[in-house]
Image (tube, rainbow, N blue to C red):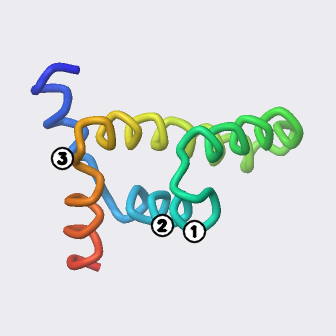
């Protein structure tokens, strides 16, 4: 990932992202793969409900972005900043 793309992802970090990190830590033992598996399963089994499907797609996109930030070792820092600004 280029630095420019990484900076754009960091700039877009918000409270929703912080919430997904908390959910990952509490419900999925800090494992992004487990969380994505569950979200994709939800999308496949409950996709007929448009609102749930759209929200689930949004969460999947956010989780994939957060995984990139986690790989760059920025999640803990961003989560701390997000918690302080809440």
Left or right placement of residue 55 versus residue 65 in this view: right
Binning the other alpha carbons within 10 Å of mark 2 as few (below 14), some (14 to 19) or many (20 upward) gives some
In this figure, which residue is indicated by the disc labeled 2? Answer: 22
Disc ID at residue 47: none
Residue at mark 1: 26
Quarter of the image where the C terminus is located: bottom left
Q: Which mark is residue 11?
A: 3
Give yes or no for contact between labels 1 and 2 (Cβ–Cβ under 8 Å).
Answer: yes
Residue extending furthest toward the front? 29
25 horizontally vs 79: left or right: right
- Mark in the foreground, 3 or 1: 1
Dots 3 and 2: beta carbons under 8 Å?
no
Coordinates of residue 32 in the picture (x, y in percent):
53, 44
Mark 3–mark 1 contact, CB under 8 Å?
A: no
Residue 38: give x, y in percent of width and height.
73, 44
Q: Earlier in the sequence, mark 3 or mark 2?
A: 3
SS for tag 3?
Answer: helix
For the point 20% across and 68% down, which residue is it?
Answer: 81
Q: Is residue 69 left or right of residue 27?
A: left
In whole angstroms, how far apart are the C-alphas of marks 3 and 2?
19 Å
Residue in the foreground of this view, choosing between 59 and 74: 74
Q: Nearer the viewer, mark 3 or mark 2?
A: 2
Say few, some or many: other residues with alpha carbon within 10 Å of mark 1 (under 14 / 14 to 19 / 20 or more): few
């Amino acid at each position: 990932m280029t630095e420019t793309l990484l900076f754009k992802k960091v700039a877009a970090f918000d409270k929703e992202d912080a919430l997904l990190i908390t959910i990952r830590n509490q419900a999925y033992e800090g494992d992004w793969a487990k969380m994505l598996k569950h979200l994709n399963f939800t999308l496949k089994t409950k996709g007929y409900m448009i609102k749930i499907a759209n929200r689930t797609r949004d969460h999947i996109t956010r989780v994939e972005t957060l995984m990139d930030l986690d790989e760059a070792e920025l999640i803990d820092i961003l989560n701390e900043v997000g918690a302080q600004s809440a």
